[in-house]
Image (cartoon, rainbow, N blue to C red):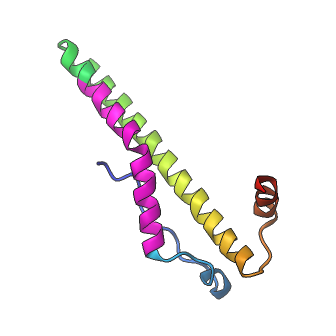
Amino acid sequence: MTTLFQSTTEPPTNQSAADFEPDEQWKSRLKVDIEDNLRSMVDEAKQSLHDTLKKAPVSAVERERLTEEHLATMKNIRNLAEEQFRIALERERQERRWAAGQVLDQEWSDTMIKEQ
């Protein structure tokens, strides 16, 4: 499957943030989970391109247009995966802060209160 993540996350900027930072194994599992959840979208995009190209002969210009559309779709899926990763990572950081009795970011505090 195409890798949906382009780079690793940035390291925390200070020691207190490092205390609440999930380890690389946690991050790797999260990436695998997100990729598994989005696999059907990736497979559907690939199948759609394949089916369209197989239906009937297409000109070089049409093939290029279809390929560009496919690449744009894949980029959108990759962006979605990265956004899901960022949200889940920040949520985990905030939950760890909360569990340790630390002050949460106001936005996350409001969100967690709404969810309860």
Is 39 included in the stretch rendered in magenta? yes
Which image quadrant is residue 32 in?
Answer: bottom left
Q: Position of residue 39 (x, y in %)?
A: 37, 43
Q: Position of residue 29 (x, y in %)?
A: 43, 65
Q: Position of residue 24 (x, y in %)?
A: 45, 75
Q: Name the residue nearer the viewer: 41 or 15.
A: 41
Which image quadrant is residue 25 in?
Answer: bottom left
The C terminus sits in image quarter: bottom right
Residue 111 vs 48, above or below: the answer is below
Mainly helix, strand or loop, the magenta region? helix
Task: Work out which residue is located at the far front of the displayed protein and give it.
Answer: 116
Task: Work out which residue is located at the far top of the displayed protein and give it.
Answer: 56
Residue 95 vs 56, above or below: the answer is below
Is residue 24 found left or right of 66 in the rendered image? right
Q: Name the residue nearer the viewer: 81 or 10.
A: 81
Q: Which residues are magenta?
A: 25-50
Q: What's the residue at 21%, 14% (across, down)?
A: 55
